[in-house]
Image: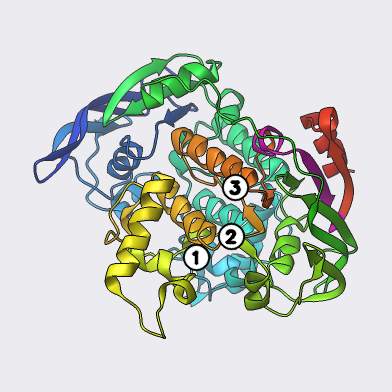
Amino acid sequence: MNPTTVDAPLFRAEQLGMSFNTVCVLESISLEIGRGEVVALLGENGAGKSTLSSIIAGSLCPTRGSMQLDGQPYAPTCPKDAIALGVNMIHQEIQLLPELSVAENIFLGHLPTRHGMLDRERMRREARVQLERLGLDISPDTLVRDLRIAAQQLVEIAKALTLESRLLILDEPTAALGAEETELLFRQIEALKREGVSFIYISHRMEEIGRIADRVLVMRDGHLVARHERADVAVDTLVAQMVGRSIERLFPAIAAPQSNEVLQVRGLSCRSKRFRDISFSVRGGEVFGIAGMVGAGRSEVIRAIAGVDPVASGEVRVDGKPLRLDGVRASIAAGVVLVPEDRKGEGVVLDHSIAENLAYCNLDRLGARGLLSRRRIDAFASERIASLGVKGDPGKHLDKLSGGNQQKVVIAKWIAREPRVIILDEPTRGIDMGARAAIYQLIADLAATGAAVVVVSSDLDEVIGLSHRVMVMARGASQGILDGEQVAPESIMALATA
């Protein structure tokens, strides 16, 4: 336990339980959080982490058990009650208002005033202080809609820091962050720990746990199945406790690439100047990784190749044929598809069914003489669901699926088109370990078809475990392409920070 923790815990839960109708989703959860302590909460999607966190944050009321905060009974009926008592939750899904500025989002709900009027100068000044603490070099007047996902996540954290929270629940706080941003966040957590702030830290990134946590709690099927008084626990042990079985190998074996070049990129530059003079090639059956810090231009490059963003100059060829870089339709027609970083915002339609989401990218293949058959769509969806192991029937809406199953749907709709080039941007962001293994196997299966697979990831283990070769980017330019034994954390970080 952290040295700053005193005997009396800041937070205590005793025999917490939660049922929805007759379904028990949380059973007999008892735990303590000391002052100035980081407790990691691990478990697969559906293990009960979100339910437990929502109860502590005031979004849900438990059906059984009790809680105490600083020795006093604690029973918030809404998030506002919890925030007023110093308990705040930062959700994985961005909850900012895109049309407002960064400063307005940070102080929303507690805007600073002077003589009864909004004190904009103070709001900007104090917002800038929080942004600088997190190493985010942006203007407080920037609209949130103009920020990348990683920057928006840091703004969420800055917002929580202004509320003088005593207990912060961080749900996948680094899912959209690169190594440098993650390290800045960890430094801020360490500083707040010294001030006595406590944390519940939820993450699927096992390598982070030993770095930031003091203790580890593991949940499975609504139960607390393991407690570790130290954070330096073997990853294999934690994974086995989370999933109830051993995962011998997280990354599947991927065969050597073919000799033919499926994708060729030469001298690619964008109009916004976020990347310049990018050149690389990907062979059939090859998994080509792109690494670098968030903001290095990785996502911008692949979005340009996929026809999402315009280019200023350069050439892309697929199977030797020039690709028209004038829109998504041309890229899809040439066999180039993109699984985007923002899965929920750009990859699926959440309030539509699995069958509908799978059909949207394949209407030309499902329609007969311009007519669509519900029976044909459902049959197509059932086949895709079975082949990729999606948990859900064709009529189930995407917002009812876990992140891992949503990602399988995004991949499934593109696989159906038998692409020559499939690009995956942060393919396992916010996905638990069991689902990660399934996604990695899908990537291996795609490579086995002879397609060129491009993977962009902020997770170094992921890039190294999947890729035959890795291009490292920094400040919008390629710093080099690593091959074979060169693909190692030290080599990647040396180029990414060059």
User: Is disc 2 in contact with disc 3, using a CB cutoff of under 8 Å?
Assistant: no
Element at badge 3? helix
Specify the label residue 404 is tagged with.
Answer: none
Q: Residue at x 70, y 73 (%)?
A: 309
User: Which one is earlier in the sequence, the residue at label 3 or at label 1?
Assistant: 1
Q: Amino acid at mark 3?
A: Leu
Q: Residue at x 59, y 66 (%)?
A: 102
In percent of width and height, residue 341 lies at 59, 57
Of tags 3 and 1, the one toward the viewer is: 3
Q: Which residues are magenta?
A: 462-477
Element at badge 2? loop
* Residue that carries the numbered disc 1 in the rendered image: 345
Element at badge 1? helix
* Residue that carries the numbered disc 2 in the rendered image: 340
Whole-number angstrom distance, CA of label 3 to CA of label 1: 24 Å
Residue 44 is a magenta residue = no
User: Which one is earlier in the sequence, the residue at label 2 or at label 3?
Assistant: 2
Q: Residue at x 46, y 66 (%)?
A: 108
In percent of width and height, residue 475 lies at 84, 56
Q: On the rendered structure, is 388 left or right of 21?
A: right
User: Is disc 2 in contact with disc 1, using a CB cutoff of under 8 Å?
Assistant: yes
Instruction: For residue 71, say whether it is visible.
Output: no
Q: On the rendered structure, is 290 left or right of 447?
A: right
* Residue that carries the numbered disc 3 in the rendered image: 446
Of tags 2 and 3, the one toward the viewer is: 3
**Quadrant where the C terminus is found in the figure:** top right
